[in-house]
């Protein structure tokens, strides 16, 4: 791919973008985009293409158009796109999946997602069947596993066991599908009462007597066919049309006496009723039931269970083994959704086969993972190493991979948990850990010999300053990776809102034509070829002599003031004069262009004098500054000179406004202003004074001035990056708000 062509409309936050990036002479391109311009939206667009999803505009619902092609107008395939997102604290939860490449990872997650969706739907139905609303906090999954003495790792085996017992007569339950009130049956109070003390003894006695009576029944046999499953048998026969087809049921008596032939369901139901009554209506059973009922009714927490028991006396015997009874209730609930259970288990079986294949593919990547870890340790400065610990068992058992983390310092080395490691690491070191994702994905793509476009979204947020150059050098190495035919594999597109990172990459890796600054013009995103990649102040000096403009002269004043401060001190007369251009003083509106020229030539342009004041010696710098401020338009471009000029104009107008209001509206206002002017940090003191003595609706604007313009004007230590990252539109709007005050 010699060229990347971007034609986008309504792609997330991008209204329109029509630009080309030339990769013919350089495999790396970088785009600096101020916050809110287009960076994240462009990354999301590439992610959608990678995943095969349609690109969207999510706010207004406009139709999206996305055409990203190479120099032959061939659309970029999603398989050839790798997107590395910015550092994300929450991403550590998914870092275990780094042991599989991105394609395997997505396959794994899709398999897992399908199972979870089916399982979630089944459990929701079971939950409702057992008397809980969908919004209830009742944990159906963990309760089931607990009742079956299982664990989350053995969930599949637990469901298989349930399936195998669905039609086992020994696990039948006398309750029908609308009577499975789990909370009434097994709440903690009920469970404790029935398992301990006098009630437990009564239940044991009741069960023993019940067993004797069942054994005497001609047509019931304990544990095989009793009143618990007679009802189920009757319902099942009827629902399947047994009697409607003129079939007959022959029941043989246990004592060998004559068998009974049943021709209708009513006959069977009547028989069941008689058999139940013979057992449950005996004097001994009734007396025991009343004792149990009396014991239970004493506790208000078991009243719901007591009411349930009045119409389900037969279940008392089940509480002799309450844990087994729980399982019967679960089986009865699952029996209602047998098809869903079968579908889920079929999905599990299919997943196991698919995951076995993924496991074999993952095994092949052990070497790549080792390379990634070695490269990570080699390139980045971190106090730890990482080793994979369960590569082979990862996928088959549906478990996330795990790592060994070895922390080291002057005291030695020690293996610790991931959570402990992350607690110890600095933010920068945590970000370095995140870089593993990028390293591994790229190494996998390299081994596959696959030509790719690698999109790095704000990768500068994923490392601290000490690792900045290490990552930049690694990006340079990536651009040189080649296949067996020595053809370069990767084209790299860097997206950043960090200007320092942009400038470093532009100076070290990309050529001028591949460094772009994005800006918005009437809703359309445009790229401007790189600016400010070298010494901005040398550029300004050259322009002052060869291509003079007033805006460059004004924008240079903060720098020269800063230069004098570092070489001569802040009591220097020329330093103080330039301070009067940045802060409104008594002489601010009387400083001439000739004075500025002389100061520039004395401290900055010593060997190559400038003469921009010739013929304009007496023009006032204040007027020039305000004129230049008025020329600036509402277009989000990078030009630092425009941002500096607006910041200076905002500050001066705001200070003049506050000064005039305090003098005119406050008693002894002149004394207050004189005291403020005698101090350093004039702007801050003016704000405090205005707030103390006036504090009207203007404070909203003035506080914005205090927040937005302070250090930008002063170019602290010659650093101009902060003001670059500031929105010109924000400054433009604030400038007009301050103008409105005056």
Image (spheres, rainbow, N blue to C red):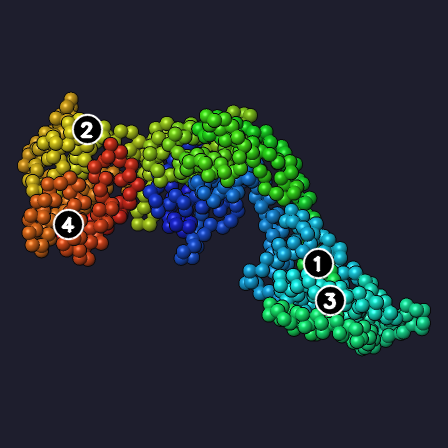
Question: How much space separates mark 3 and mark 4, taking CA atoms?
Answer: 85 Å
Question: How much space separates mark 4 and mark 2, taking CA atoms?
Answer: 30 Å
Out of 461 and 280, give the one closest to the viewer.
280
Question: How much space separates mark 1 and mark 4, taking CA atoms?
Answer: 77 Å
**Of marks 3 and 4, the one in the foreground:** 3
Residue 2, labelled with which disc?
A: none
Residue 566, labelled with which disc?
A: 2
Q: Is tag 1's residue or tag 2's residue first in the polypeptide sequence?
A: 1
Within-10-Å neighbours for mark 3: few <14, some 14–19, many 20+: some
Residue with the mark numbered 4: 689
Q: Is tag 2's residue or tag 3's residue first in the polypeptide sequence?
A: 3
User: Would residue 24 be seen by someone viewing this image from the given angle?
Assistant: no
Q: Is tag 3's residue or tag 1's residue first in the polypeptide sequence?
A: 3
Out of 616 and 722, give the one closest to the viewer.
722
**Of marks 4 and 2, the one in the foreground:** 4
**Of marks 1 and 2, the one in the foreground:** 1
Q: Is tag 4's residue or tag 2's residue first in the polypeptide sequence?
A: 2
Figure check: 240 above or below 101:
below
**Of marks 3 and 1, the one in the foreground:** 3
Within-10-Å neighbours for mark 1: few <14, some 14–19, many 20+: some
Out of 168 and 721, give the one closest to the viewer.
168
Residue 323, labelled with which disc?
A: 1
Residue with the mark numbered 3: 202
**Of marks 2 and 3, the one in the foreground:** 3
């Amino acid at each position: 791919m010699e060229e990347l062509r971007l034609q986008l409309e309504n792609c997330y936050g991008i209204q329109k973008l029509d630009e080309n990036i030339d990769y013919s002479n350089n495999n790396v391109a970088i785009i600096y985009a101020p916050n809110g311009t287009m960076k994240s939206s462009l990354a999301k667009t590439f992610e959608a293409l990678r995943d095969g999803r349609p690109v969207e505009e999510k706010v207004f619902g406009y139709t999206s158009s996305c055409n990203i092609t190479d120099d032959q107008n061939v659309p970029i395939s999603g398989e050839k796109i790798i997107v590395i997102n910015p550092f994300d604290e929450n991403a550590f939860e998914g870092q275990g999946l780094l042991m599989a490449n991105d394609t395997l990872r997505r396959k794994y997650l899709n398999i897992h997602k399908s199972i979870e969706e089916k399982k979630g739907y089944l459990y929701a139905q079971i939950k409702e069947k057992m008397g809980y609303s969908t919004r209830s906090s009742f944990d159906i999954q963990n309760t089931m596993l607990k009742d079956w003495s299982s664990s989350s790792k053995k969930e599949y085996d637990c469901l298989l066991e349930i399936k195998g017992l669905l039609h086992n007569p020994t696990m039948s339950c006398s309750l029908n599908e609308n009577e499975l009130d789990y909370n009434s049956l097994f709440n903690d109070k009920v469970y404790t009462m029935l398992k301990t003390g006098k009630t437990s003894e009564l239940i044991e006695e009741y069960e023993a007597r019940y067993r004797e009576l069942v054994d005497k029944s001609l047509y019931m046999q304990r544990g095989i066919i009793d009143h618990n499953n007679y009802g189920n048998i009757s319902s099942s026969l009827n629902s399947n049309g047994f009697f409607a087809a003129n079939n007959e049921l022959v029941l043989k008596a246990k004592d060998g006496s004559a068998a009974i032939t049943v021709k209708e369901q009513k006959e069977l139901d009547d028989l069941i009723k008689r058999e139940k009554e013979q057992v449950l209506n005996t004097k001994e059973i009734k007396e025991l039931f009343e004792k149990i009922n009396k014991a239970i009714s004493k506790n208000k927490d078991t009243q719901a269970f007591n009411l349930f028991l009045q119409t389900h006396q037969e279940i008392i015997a089940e509480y002799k083994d309450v844990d087994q009874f729980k399982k019967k209730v679960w089986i009865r609930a699952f029996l209602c959704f047998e098809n869903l259970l079968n579908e889920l288990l079929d999905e599990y079986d299919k997943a196991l086969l698919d995951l076995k294949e993924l496991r074999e593919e993952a095994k092949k990547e052990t070497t790549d993972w080792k390379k990634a870890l070695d490269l990570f340790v080699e390139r980045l400065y971190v106090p730890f190493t990482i080793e994979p610990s369960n590569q082979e068992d990862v996928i088959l058992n549906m478990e996330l991979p795990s790592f060994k983390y070895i922390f080291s310092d002057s005291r030695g080395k020690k293996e610790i948990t991931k959570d402990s490691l992350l607690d110890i690491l600095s933010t920068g070191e945590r970000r370095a850990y995140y870089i593993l994702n990028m390293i591994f994905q790229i190494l996998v793509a390299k081994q596959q010999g696959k030509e790719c476009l690698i999109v790095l979204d704000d990768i500068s947020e994923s490392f601290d300053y000490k690792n900045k150059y290490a990552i930049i050098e690694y990006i340079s190495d990536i651009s040189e990776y080649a296949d067996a035919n020595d053809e370069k594999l990767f084209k790299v597109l860097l997206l950043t809102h960090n200007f320092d990172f942009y400038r470093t990459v532009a100076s070290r890796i990309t050529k001028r034509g591949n460094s772009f600054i994005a800006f918005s013009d009437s809703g359309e995103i445009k790229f401007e070829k790189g600016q400010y990649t070298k010494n901005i102040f040398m550029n300004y000096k050259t322009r002052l002599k060869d291509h003079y403009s007033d805006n460059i002269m004004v924008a240079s004043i903060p720098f020269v003031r800063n230069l004098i401060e570092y070489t001569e001190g802040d009591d220097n007369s020329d330093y103080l004069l330039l301070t009067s251009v940045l802060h409104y003083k008594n002489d601010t509106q009387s400083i001439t262009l000739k004075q500025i020229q002389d100061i520039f030539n004395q401290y900055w342009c010593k060997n190559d004098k400038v003469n921009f004041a010739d013929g304009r010696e007496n023009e006032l710098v204040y007027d020039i500054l305000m004129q230049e401020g008025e020329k600036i338009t509402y277009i989000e471009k990078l030009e630092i000179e425009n941002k500096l000029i607006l910041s200076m104009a905002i500050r001066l107008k705001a200070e003049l406004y506050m000064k005039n209001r305090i003098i005119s509206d406050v008693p002894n206002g002149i004394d207050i202003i004189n005291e403020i002017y005698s101090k350093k940090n004039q702007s801050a003191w003016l704000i405090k004074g205005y707030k103390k003595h006036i504090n009207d609706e203007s404070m909203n604007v003035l506080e914005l001035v205090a927040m937005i313009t302070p250090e930008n004007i002063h170019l602290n230590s010659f650093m101009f990056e902060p003001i670059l990252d500031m929105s010109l539109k924000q400054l433009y709007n604030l400038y007009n708000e301050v103008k409105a005050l005056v």
